[in-house]
Image (spheres, rainbow, N blue to C red):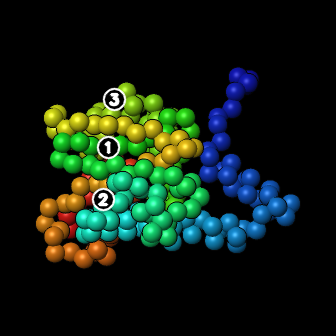
Amino acid sequence: MTTGTTAPVPAALRTEALEQLLTERGLIDPAVMDGLITEYEVNIGPLNGAKVVAKAWTDPVYRQRLLDDSTAAIDELGFIGRQGEHIVVVENTPTIHNVVVCTLCSCYPWSVLGLPPSWYKDPAYRARVVKEPRTVLSEMGLDLADDVQITVHDSSSEVRWLVLPERPAGTENLSEEQLARLVTRDAMVGVAKVEAP
């Protein structure tokens, strides 16, 4: 006897089946798809955003331009592209912590952060981080002092947000390139801090 319900098929299996069908019909080329994925994971990925952050940490004039006109400052480094046409950068300080979400879908600045993580698109994150950001951040491993003000920024198709994390203490002698290696995607979304080496 059956109940008439079936278990949902995992997303990875559905994706694989869809890719196979599209390939069989000649609608996509797996080599092209692999190249696009690699481009976003490796070349475009969070490394672009990390370079923006490291430059802002080491160049006060650039930092001010970044905060005043984020899109133009990011474009100076050549990182404006799809899903990054208008970006606003907000700065974390010892008393203010910014975190980014897209409550409607999963708008995200791909040109500086690469592919969005699965948790960013998850309905639970999108709903809860707005209502209880301190709790969600704590669950993700980031505990902030009670006196730190948390501001949640909602990305949309018109504007994407990027967090300029606090520069960790003890990194004063590191080069821009060395600093960029410390910056993570999660810190630029605001769910983590950058840790000193």
Is tag 2's residue or tag 3's residue first in the polypeptide sequence? Answer: 2
Q: Secondary structure at mark 3?
A: loop
Indicate left or right for 28 with 69 as reference.
right
User: Label 3 is placed on what type of residue?
Assistant: Glu
Numbered circle sitting on residue 98: 1
Say which residue appears at 31% left-offset and 40% top-offset: 137
- The residue under label 3 is 132
Q: Secondary structure at mark 2?
A: helix
Screen quadrant of the N terminus: top right
Quick check: 18 above or below 102? below
- The residue under label 2 is 64
Label 3, label 1: how far apart the Cα atoms are: 13 Å
Please state the horizontal and vertical placement of residue 69, each as a whole percent of the image: 41, 55
Screen quadrant of the C terminus: bottom left
User: Label 2 is placed on what type of residue?
Assistant: Gln
Residue 152 shows in this picture: yes
User: Label 1 is placed on what type of residue?
Assistant: Asn
Q: Secondary structure at mark 1?
A: strand
Is tag 2's residue or tag 1's residue first in the polypeptide sequence? Answer: 2
